[in-house]
Amino acid sequence: MIGQAWERWLAWVFWARQGRRSFLRFVTLLAIVGVAVGVAALEVALFLSRGFSREITAKIMGFGAHVQVMRYGEGPLTGADSLLGLLERVDARIRTVAPVISGQAIAQGPKDLDGVLLYGVDPERDASFLRDRIVAGTYLLRRNPEPTVVLSGALARRLGVELGDVLWVYVAHGVPSPFSPPRMARLRIAGLYETGLTEFDEAFVVLHLEQARALLGYPPDTVSRFELTLTDPRQADEVAARIEDRLGFPVAARSIFQIYRSLFAWVELQEGTIPLVVAILVVVAAFNLVGTLLMVVLEKSAHIGVLKTLGATDRAIARIFLFEGALFGAAGILLGNGMALGLGWLERRYALLPLPVEVYYVDRAPVHMVASDFLIVSTLAFALCLLSTYFPARVARRIHPVEALRFL
């Protein structure tokens, strides 16, 4: 007598017209909003955790390359020219190979002096992302006719220098004395960068490879290490192991995930735990539908009695309230998706959540929206909403028509 299309239509009528009681209408609205808030909160948590992971990972990999090749123990790598050629051929996944000379020094400005880490690179081979992080000047590294240097805006402010000023750099060899004076260089500041990574910004001074060689006293054909970028950074561990197998002792290859293990562990913690905690909101909101639907069942008891008198089966009655629960879930999920999209757009456009850079490595909450997150969250929320309608539907199918008709 009653087909499924008719059941769905009746479920829509029950859902759209929640009787004469304003309290029931309020509870219905509250149930939909609860599902919407839970869905939106979970999706926003996923957006933010993915944004943090993407932004911080890109910064770490951009500054430290994907794989570093160095010598076992201390000391520079010798035979750098021939080793560079071997590294370029050892694995097809290696995109660039850049020699690096690094060491400790003292930088002096008008305001202060401080210990820094010299980072000497070959401008023609350097694959650092600092070119895209320049906030003043240009990423210009030269040795002649006037040596230039690039440093962070934070370090420049601490030393009291600005773009175009002169920075003095000193490197001590042994105990400074009249017989062993430190090496020094007069470097012109060509550019200022900002990455948001405090550990790098407050210490690194980037200069030409040969200028670093002269300051640190490296002999020809030696470097501190090689920094490699890959076509797929996720394979850094595998490529590092392959380099060690192919080249053997005394070369050590470490992936970016090994070098900055603690930072990546922090990123994984942020990405894994926050959505898990927020997901509880979706579960609570979905099961709040149980109470709402039970109220609807009591409100519609007389209607249920009439339907059963007309020949509606218990299974048909149950399906009506299952459909109604699905409508509650669908409305809440659609509203929640809209809220999440709106909040994500507002954060991208207006940076509503400023963050301390020294703690989170970014000055605003990064947002990375992925279509699969919407699909997964919506599917799980809808499944929970359907599950929460099971008990009210069983209550509805057990209502006896004779008892229900007394409420007419």
Image: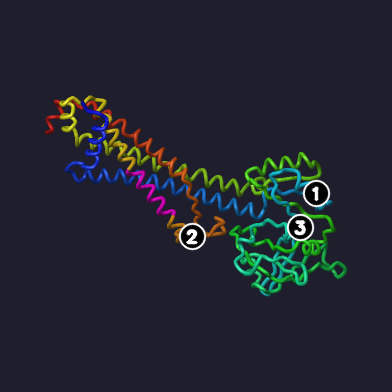
Circle 2 is placed at which residue position? 354
Q: Residue at x 64, y 54 (%)?
A: 62
Residue 82: x, y in percent?
82, 50
Residue 143 figure quarter: bottom right
Q: Position of residue 113 (x, y in %)?
A: 70, 69
Label 1 Cα crowd, 10 Å radius (few <14 / some 14-19 / many 20+): some
Identity of the amino acid at label 2?
Pro
The residue type indicated by label 1 comes to: Leu
- Marks 2/1: CA distance? 46 Å
Q: In what element is the residue under mark 3?
A: strand
The quadrant the C terminus occupies is top left
Task: For marks 2 and 3, give the CA distance.
Answer: 36 Å
Mark 2: few, some, or many residues within 10 Å (few <14, many ≥20)? few
Q: Is residue 150 above or below residue 260?
A: below
Residue type at the position of mark 3: Ile
Q: Residue visible at 73% across and 45% down?
A: 253
Q: Is residue 227 left or right of residue 407?
A: right
Disc 1 on helix, strand or loop? helix
